[in-house]
Image (cartoon, rainbow, N blue to C red):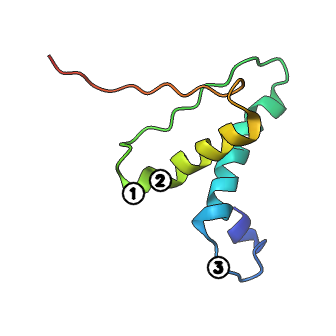
Amino acid sequence: RQGDRGDYLGATVQVIPHITDEIKRAITRLPENEPDLDVVITEIGGTVGDIESLPFLEAIRQFRLEHGPRNVCFIHVTLVPF
């Protein structure tokens, strides 16, 4: 969105910090609009090793550093075929 509006003034948009910052803003936008929320569950999805998911994983890593480990919990799930 910011690139479409021209917020970067023709500068190169980088994964870090531009895209990761926008991902973090998207995570915090819901609680700002719904002040009664106590918990927000956000699914990252994808496969950890895929390059496409790296900006999202970096964003949540930064999010935890900014908000503290007592306020952010990661739960990893995997398929276990039987």
How many dots with numbers?
Answer: 3
Q: Mark 2: few, some, or many residues within 10 Å (few <14, many ≥20)?
A: some
Q: Mark 1: few, some, or many residues within 10 Å (few <14, many ≥20)?
A: few
Q: In this picture, is 45 found above or below 22?
A: above
4 vs 24, nearest the viewer:
24
Sequence-first disc among 2 and 3: 3
Q: Is mark 3 on a helix, strand or loop?
A: loop
Quadrant housing residue 73: top right
Q: Is mark 2 on a helix, strand or loop?
A: helix
- Tag 2: residue type? Leu
Residue beneath label 1, please? 51
Q: Mark 3: few, some, or many residues within 10 Å (few <14, many ≥20)?
A: few
Instruction: Measure the C-alpha gap from mark 3 to mark 1.
Output: 20 Å
Q: What element carries label 1?
A: helix
Residue beneath label 3, please? 12
- Tag 3: residue type? Thr
Q: In this picture, is 62 found above or below 40?
A: below
Q: In this view, does 3 lie to the left or right of 54?
A: right
How far from the left and from the top, in percent, is residue 33?
82, 32
Q: In this picture, is 6 found above or below 34?
A: below
Residue at 64%, 73% in the rendered image: 13
The numbered disc on residue 54 is 2
Query: Marks 1 and 3: in contact by CB < 8 Å?
Result: no
Instruction: Measure the C-alpha gap from mark 2 to mark 3.
Output: 19 Å
Residue at 75%, 35% in the rendered image: 67
Dividing the image into 4 quarters, which one contains the N terminus? bottom right
Dividing the image into 4 quarters, which one contains the C terminus? top left
